[in-house]
Amino acid sequence: MPNPVEPDDAAVRHRTPVARVVGGTGAAMLVVAALVILVAAMTAPGDGPRNMGSDGIRISADLRAVPTKALAAGEPAMQLTADDGAVDVRLYVDYRCVHCAQFDAANGELLAELADDGAIVLEIHPLGWLGADSVAAGNAAACVADLAPNAYLAYHHELLQHIGTSLNDEQLTALATESGAPATRQVATCIGDGEFDHWVRDTTRRARTQPIAELGSPVLAAPTVLIDGEQYTGSFDDPEAFAEALQQHLAPAA
């Protein structure tokens, strides 16, 4: 498994507005003051995305997202569990992580089928461990969760299929549209402005520093896969091994 890297301030995208100073010193001071206020407003922590109240999006029967409210800045993540005997499958992924892409290529179709049937609730946690591209992709995923949650799973697959490509904001937006998100200015602006960059950094920090109750430790690598709270330790690119691990939890409900 790769050794995850936590993004620092230098790695994270910063969008600093540029202004041309005209006039005398007083005008220059006013422009500087306005820039300080604007940059502070753009970088101050705010609410997280809707439908990610557990720091992940939960996808259940008919591949529909389970709605949750947005978390306010500093608010702890919700602890959610599956209903009606469904198996909880939780994924912690970085959309620049090669092993995450391998896991999805081998097992993504099975997980989608089981979630569609209501046999599992699939909970996906996007992380930003591997630098600015990770944060950009995590933000784009959060935008889709917030504005088009039922398109999230398709977008998740698309991002992992483009693992070797550094995607710009326009490409991330185009992939969101191809995945079923509406081709609206709201989606494009959310992705282009990095509306949830702060949330990606926060949820990544929480994953790395706050122990998962079932494991007694934080998330140490990507991907991390939990089946009803039990960590899957088999090969990420062996679909038979993963299906067997899943079946051990599905069998009692059959």
Image (cartoon, rainbow, N blue to C red):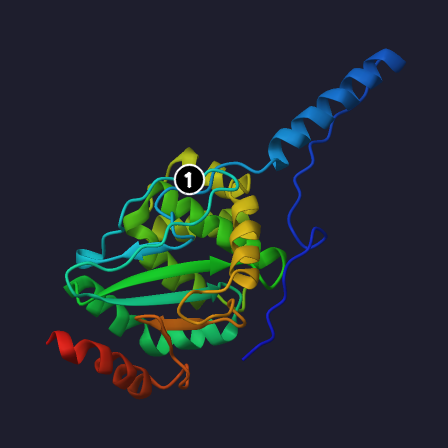
Tell me the crowding category of disc 1: few under 14, some 14 to 19, or many 20 or more residues within 10 angstroms, Cα based.
many
- Residue 220: where, in percent of width, then height? 54, 71
Q: Nearer the viewer, residue 144 or 229?
A: 229
Location of residue 31 with respect to 131 vertically, above or below: above
Q: Quarter holding the N terminus?
A: bottom right
Lateral position of residue 24 relative to residue 219, left or right:
right
Lateral position of residue 121 relative to residue 105, left or right:
left
Q: Residue furthest right?
A: 25
Secondary structure beneath dot 1 equals helix
> Pointer 1: what residue?
187
The answer to whether any part of residue 180 appears in the image is no
Q: Residue at x 37, y 64 (%)?
A: 157
Q: Quadrant of residue 230?
A: bottom left
Q: Residue furthest left?
A: 254
Q: Nearer the viewer, residue 101 or 79?
A: 79
- Residue 182: where, in percent of width, then height? 33, 41
Q: Quarter holding the C terminus?
A: bottom left
Lateral position of residue 193 relative to residue 56, left or right:
right
- Residue 142: where, in percent of width, then height? 44, 48
The answer to whether any part of residue 49 appears in the image is yes
- Residue 228: where, in percent of width, then height? 30, 70
Check disc 1 and give the amino acid type. Answer: Val
Lateral position of residue 156 relative to residue 117, left or right:
right
Q: Residue at x 16, y 63 (%)?
A: 118
Q: Nearer the viewer, residue 84 or 237?
A: 84
Total numbered badges shown on the rendered structure: 1
Q: Residue at x 46, y 38 (%)?
A: 72
Q: Quadrant of residue 109?
A: bottom left
Q: Residue at x 76, y 21 (%)?
A: 33
